[in-house]
Image (cartoon, rainbow, N blue to C red):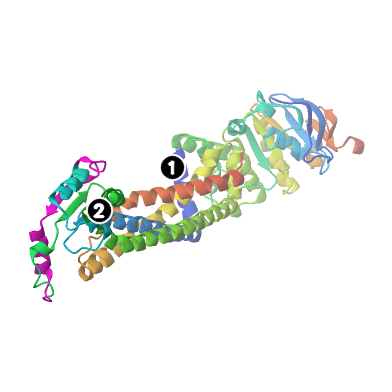
């Protein structure tokens, strides 16, 4: 009976205060769109990191003939030096960070360079002009610096190069975008809380007569407050659903429909990822409304 | 049923007490008029019984409960044992007569069947049978007050508090309301009515409690409105 009563009150409340309900829904929509966008951007960054970092390698260039680095003063790398370097990587302190080491022989290095060279600059070089290169895959590419520090000073090492550096700028750009979206989301959430608070306060004031009668005839505080809280929650959930729909359309038609075609070499998030974010957005909306109303109603629906 | 032991109420520090050392007992089934000029403390007296306010000192007992020690979450339970009727009726304008009365039962969780059985019975008792579907604005003042009484009494509370229930009504209509309250009192319900209506008090010849400046100045069985005017 009480459930029916509360449901009836919620329905009546929404009907009578439809403009207020709409404003709560819209502000929640905008703020949760930002929250969702921030989450999706972060997911995209993570996805790119996973995809690209999985492929990137740390390359240790060994001293080749004629190299002028201090480390190479004694001449090209020797087999003994190469073995010592490999020992550090495979059995030394950093061995638990290393997934695999591939030794690219000077012949392979030569072939790769000559193959990629369409200008003819390298046409007169021989495999003997190169030194082998160690291609290292790490369990966690973020640990690059540790491996670099452990190997850079070793005799026979000309330079250590991390392909990850290529992506660093892009990732910092994407991370900045996530932070910006998160800050905007925070501001919008605050706006939403304030608006929901004001809306529920107005709603409680406009129904003072009703709540007074409820108090007088012995309704419990929770029963008096429930319709207001649920009204806020329903309106906010409406906003969350709009936000989810908005994000889904953006990912479906902008990312999947357009970006994938225009810049195809990037691994993009898909509309399925929106569904992963969706339950959290609804939870956030309901939580937002309930918290806002709990604080407001304490004052306006006293027993 | 209602007992005040040395009850005082001061609203703000340093102000004159709204009630000052009130000692009074109202038995089950009593019909009591609470009289006194504006500001004499009648409303505070009723608010203390409804636990809308707490006494500053002294003990208020209502239906076996000591209200000063009653926790907030038990207040709704107390109010279910007290019906309240006001001068301004306090009906919900967008609900029909039936819905207004049913509202009181719905909010305390009565079943639909109970509501369906009780509300028409109550409307019959207050003389509004056949007007279930009317809205408050379609009723006369007297009829609106009858709806308010039906709502207050539909749960059959042992106590009925009436704050100037005839204050907005003409003398003829007031008589009808008083007959109704008398009838409810005869079912064993304690009725406490704050009023300025001397004619009614004089006609009914019930117990009269008079407050003046927050003090109890008269408690008289079969009394009249003002002693000095008799």
Q: Which quadrant would the N terminus of chain B be assigned to in this image?
A: top right
- The percent position of residue B5, horizontal first and vertical second, equals 77, 25
Q: Quadrant of residue B20?
A: top right
Horizontally, is A123 left or right of A269 in the view? left
Q: Nearer the viewer, residue B227 or B111?
A: B111
Give the CA distance from mark 2 to mark 1.
Answer: 51 Å
According to the picture, the residue beneath numbered tag 2 turns out to be A50
- The percent position of residue B182, horizontal first and vertical second, equals 69, 33
Most extreme residue toward the bottom is A119
Q: Residue at x 27, y 49 (%)?
A: A147
- The percent position of residue A183, horizontal first and vertical second, equals 45, 58
Q: Determine the chain carrying the residue at label 2.
A: A
Determine whether the residue tagged by mark 2 lies in a helix, strand or loop: helix
Q: Nearer the viewer, mark 2 or mark 1?
A: 2
Q: Residue at x 52, y 36 (%)?
A: B108
- The percent position of residue B118, horizontal first and vertical second, equals 51, 35
Which segment is the magenta one? A91-120
Horizontally, is B27 left or right of A164 in the view? right
Q: Nearer the viewer, residue B39 or A199?
A: A199
Horizontally, is A226 left or right of A123 in the view? right
Q: Quadrant of residue B74?
A: top right
Q: Residue at x 33, y 57 (%)?
A: A40
Residue B120 visible: no
Question: Neighbour class for label 2 at 10 Å: few (<14), some, many (≥20)?
Answer: some
Q: Is residue A117 above or below residue A29?
A: below
Q: Is residue A99 magenta?
A: yes
Sequence-earlier tag: 2 or 1: 1
Q: Is residue A177 above or below residue B56?
A: below
According to the picture, the residue beneath numbered tag 1 turns out to be A4
Q: Which quadrant would the C terminus of chain B be assigned to in this image?
A: top right
Determine whether the residue tagged by mark 1 lies in a helix, strand or loop: helix
Q: Nearer the viewer, residue A242 or B130?
A: A242
């Amino acid at each position: 009976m009480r459930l029916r009563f509360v449901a009836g009150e919620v329905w009546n409340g929404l009907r009578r205060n439809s403009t207020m309900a709409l404003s709560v829904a819209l502000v929640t929509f905008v703020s949760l769109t930002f929250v969702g966008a921030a989450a999706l951007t972060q997911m995209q960054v993570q996805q790119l990191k996973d995809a690209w970092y999985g492929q990137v390698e740390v390359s240790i260039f060994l001293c080749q003939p004629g190299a002028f680095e201090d480390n190479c003063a004694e001449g090209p790398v020797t087999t003994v030096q190469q073995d010592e370097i490999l020992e550090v990587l495979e059995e030394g302190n950093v061995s638990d960070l290393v997934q695999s080491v591939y030794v690219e022989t000077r012949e392979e290095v030569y072939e790769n360079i000559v193959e990629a060279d369409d200008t003819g600059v390298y046409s007169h070089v021989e495999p003997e002009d190169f030194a082998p290169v160690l291609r290292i895959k790490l369990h966690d590419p973020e640990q690059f610096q540790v491996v670099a520090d452990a190997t850079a000073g070793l005799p026979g090492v000309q330079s250590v190069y991390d392909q990850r550096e290529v992506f660093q700028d892009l990732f910092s750009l994407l991370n900045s975008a996530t932070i910006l979206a998160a800050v905007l989301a925070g501001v919008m959430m605050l706006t939403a809380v304030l608006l929901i608070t004001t809306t529920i306060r107005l709603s409680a004031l406009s129904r003072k007569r009703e709540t007074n009668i409820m108090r007088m005839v012995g309704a419990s505080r929770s029963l008096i407050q429930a319709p207001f809280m649920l009204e806020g929650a329903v309106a906010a959930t409406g906003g969350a659903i709009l936000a989810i729909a908005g994000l889904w359309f953006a990912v479906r038609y902008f990312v999947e429909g357009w970006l994938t075609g225009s810049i195809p070499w990037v691994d993009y998030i898909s509309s399925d990822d929106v569904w992963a974010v969706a339950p959290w957005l609804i939870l956030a909306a309901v939580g937002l409304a309930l918290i806002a109303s709990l604080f407001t109603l304490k004052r306006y629906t006293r027993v | 049923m209602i007992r005040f032991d040395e009850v005082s109420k001061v609203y703000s520090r340093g102000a004159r007490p709204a009630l000052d050392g009130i000692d009074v007992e109202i038995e089950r089934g009593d019909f009591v008029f609470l009289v006194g000029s504006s500001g004499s403390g009648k409303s505070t007296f009723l608010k203390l019984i409804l636990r809308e306010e707490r006494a500053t000192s002294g003990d208020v007992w209502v239906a076996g409960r000591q209200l000063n020690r009653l926790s907030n979450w038990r207040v709704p339970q107390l109010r279910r044992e007290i019906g309240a009727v006001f001068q301004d009726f306090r009906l919900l304008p967008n609900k029909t007569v039936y819905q207004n009365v049913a509202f009181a039962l719905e909010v305390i969780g009565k079943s639909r069947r109970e509501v369906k059985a009780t509300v028409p019975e109550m409307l019959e008792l207050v003389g509004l049978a056949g007007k279930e579907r009317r809205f408050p604005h379609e009723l006369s003042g007297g009829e609106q007050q009858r709806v308010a009484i039906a709502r207050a009494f539909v749960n059959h509370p042992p106590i009925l508090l009436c704050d100037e229930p005839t204050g907005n009504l003409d003398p003829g209509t007031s008589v009808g309301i008083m007959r109704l309250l008398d009838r409810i009192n005869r079912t064993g319900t304690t009725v406490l009515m704050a009023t300025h209506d001397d004619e009614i008090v004089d006609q009914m010849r019930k117990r009269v409690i008079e407050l003046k400046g927050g003090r109890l100045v008269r408690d008289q069985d079969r009394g009249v409105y003002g002693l000095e005017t008799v």
